[in-house]
Image (tube, helix red, strand yellow):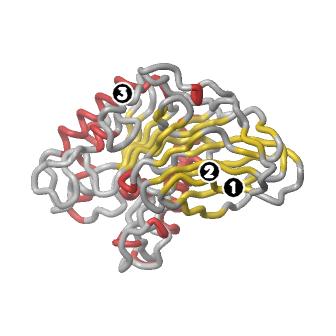
Amino acid sequence: MKTSMKKLTSVIFLSVAACSAGANELTESEQLRLIGRFQPVQTEAVSFTWPGSAVEYRFRGSETAVTITVPERMRFWVEVDDNKGRELWAEPSVQDYTLAQSLPNAEHKVRLTRLAESFSGVAKITGLPSTDGELLGAPAAPERQLLVIGDSITAGYGVEGDSKDCSYSQDTSTPLKAYAGLTASALNADIHTIAWSGIGVWRSYGEETPKSPTIAERRKLTLADDFDTPWSSDSYRPDAVLINIGTNDFWQGSAPGYPQAMATILSEVRSDYPGTPVYFIVSPMLGGEAREQQAEYLNELATANDVAVLDTGRIKPEDGYGCDWHPNELTNQRMADKLVARLREDLGW
């Protein structure tokens, strides 16, 4: 990055409440659009954890950079002027990262998306992006908004893996290629991805009885592992809520606490977003009696006009697998195609 690049002093637009300790100037700008959940930090920084959280802005110039702090090596995705994009790895510490350079001296749009899951730690952006030109007004938000609540499938665990034999790695995981991310892209919709690998609504993977916080608890947080950062449902009003949870509840083949836990989260979601359509998605990773049982439980809950059950199909062995038996890109695309068709039909999109 050229030393002549100037650091602008405007503030960032953020659709969350200001810090209780006082106004956070990053929440008041009209030059950045933050997609997802961001926690104000002091006066000029924001923290975020959920996969798929994104920063979008426009500038006039030829290069731009942002200041990112991460606790461990963390994978992001950078898109400039709606191109195919590239990965960016942030290293532990506070560093400036060049997102674009050697561009024509003109107007450009940049989007930076966190791919890493929440358990990789809290990422922080400090100050506005720097540029050799000037920041412009933030890109317009799309008219459509989705909220998806899920586990590793929704987070894109191993979606880029080449077989079931690989284990979790940031290198092969991305919510952008998971069914929900693909759906949002196809429908030109913003999306809040509230997902955590291994989690359930009653119990998580490997637990005989519930021990860890469930997705019902974590979905209420701005930072996924910080219970001192409550999220206000008024901060984001989705047009539809997708709930794909249950794979880990059924890790032993049965889940006696699942029906009541799902009934509770459904009641809470409908209270948070009255009249908003809710779609339960049957797990593509479950089979046999477990799959039948989950579908039966979900159908028993879907008695209201604004609640539906959508079966996007199981993983087909002939299509291959992502890491640890997860859906690969082909399976996720098939799931997304069905979901996109259903949302277009139901919502007129």
Q: Nearer the viewer, mark 2 or mark 1?
A: 1
What is the secondary structure assignment of the residue under circle 1? strand
Using residue 55 as the reference point, say whether residue 215 is left or right of it.
left
Pointer 3: what residue? Answer: 270
- Indicate the position of residue 145 as horizontal and vertical percent values: 55, 35
Which of the two residues, 83 or 44, is positioned nearer the viewer here?
Answer: 44
Disc sitting over residue 99 in the figure: 1
Q: Residue at x 25, y 51 (%)?
A: 294
Tell me which amino acid carries mark 3.
Arg
Query: Residue 129: x, y in percent?
Result: 68, 43
User: Picture coordinates of residue 264 (x, y %)?
Assistant: 24, 33
Q: Quadrant of residue 229?
A: top left
Which residue is the site of mark 2? 112
Which corner quadrant holds the N terminus? bottom right
Residue 255 vs residue 27, the one in the foreground: 27
Q: In the figure, 158 relative to 247: above or below? A: below
Q: Nearer the viewer, residue 111 or 286?
A: 111
Cα gap from disc 2 to disc 1, whole angstroms: 8 Å
Choose mark 1 or mark 3, whichever is in front. Answer: 1
Identify which amino acid the numbered label 2 is placed on: Leu
Q: Earlier in the sequence, mark 2 or mark 1?
A: 1
Mark yes or no: residue 349 visible.
Answer: no
